[in-house]
Image (cartoon, grey):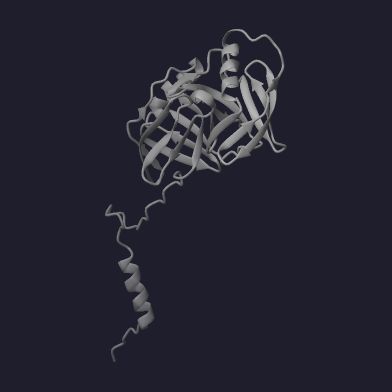
Amino acid sequence: MRNELSVPLTVLALLTLAACGSGSGNGDGDGVGKASAPDVPLAGVHWSFDSVTVGGEKTTAPDGAHVEITEKGRAQGNYGCNPFGATAKVDGDTLAVGAAESTAVGCEPSAQKFEEKVQTVFTGRLKAQLTGKKLTLTSGGGDTIALTSEEPAPLIGTTWTVNSLLDGDVATPMPAGTAKGARFIFTKDGKVRGNLGCNSFTAPAKITGSKITLGRVAATRMMCAGTAGQVEAHLLKVLDQEVTYNLLHRGLTLTGPGDKRVSAVAER
């Protein structure tokens, strides 16, 4: 009498499914299916540059240096002095950045140094490692860029540091020795106070829509010579009665009479 092996249909079905799933999903012949790694979530985030390290030398980023990766495949930001734009594509843990277009305003020496170094690294294919709010981009040569994700800054209650003087469309970097000297804060009790670059000041400030109506500026009376005096004189021309403001994430532009303007960045 012949013995027959009886295999339940459910077992046969499982064996068939296992056989179908044993092929490689990427054609590499290793017999193991592989799913594509998800893209690192870089798009739609305001990334502030912290530093760039080239050849083992670390250079700290100036205030206001940032980049945003858009959903439409662009990297847009500011090196800390000059704005820039480039194509950008996230593929898994790799960010591919195209050649950048940038303005060419002369920068304060430390900002210029950072700008030159970060331009050499923030291009081509970069490996992205995200840990909490910290992002590290690493080039094929081992140079790195450190960044931090940051939330938008509110107009009121934020300390704003002046980083550029503008007259119409002409932008002038902060004169040597005046970096971070001029700063101000709009307070909840309807005032603006801070430092003009030399003297401390305060003034009533009523915010309506995109306008700020300023009262008389009261300031200390130190003698201000040289570059600090230049910054103070420019800022006083901006803060004259009515100012228009433009708030963009962590950047602020104030426009006063005669198209005199200053740009400022939120302190961390």
The vertical placement of 94 against 78, above or below, is below
- Quarter of the picture containing the N terminus is bottom left
Q: Nearer the viewer, residue 199 or 255?
A: 255
Q: Indicate left or right for 152 with 20 as reference.
A: right
Q: Indicate left or right for 151 with 191 as reference.
A: left
The vertical placement of 77 against 197, above or below, is below
- Percent across and percent down for residue 114 are 47, 22
- Percent across and percent down for residue 145 are 47, 31
The vertical placement of 26 against 172, above or below, is below
Q: Nearer the viewer, residue 71 or 27?
A: 71
The vertical placement of 71 against 217, above or below, is below
Q: Nearer the viewer, residue 251 or 47?
A: 251
- Percent across and percent down for residue 196 are 63, 20
- Percent across and percent down for residue 268 are 61, 32
Q: Residue at x 41, y 48 (%)?
A: 39
Q: Quadrant of residue 25?
A: bottom left
Q: Is residue 114 visible in the rendered structure shown here? A: yes
Q: Residue at x 49, y 15 (%)?
A: 109
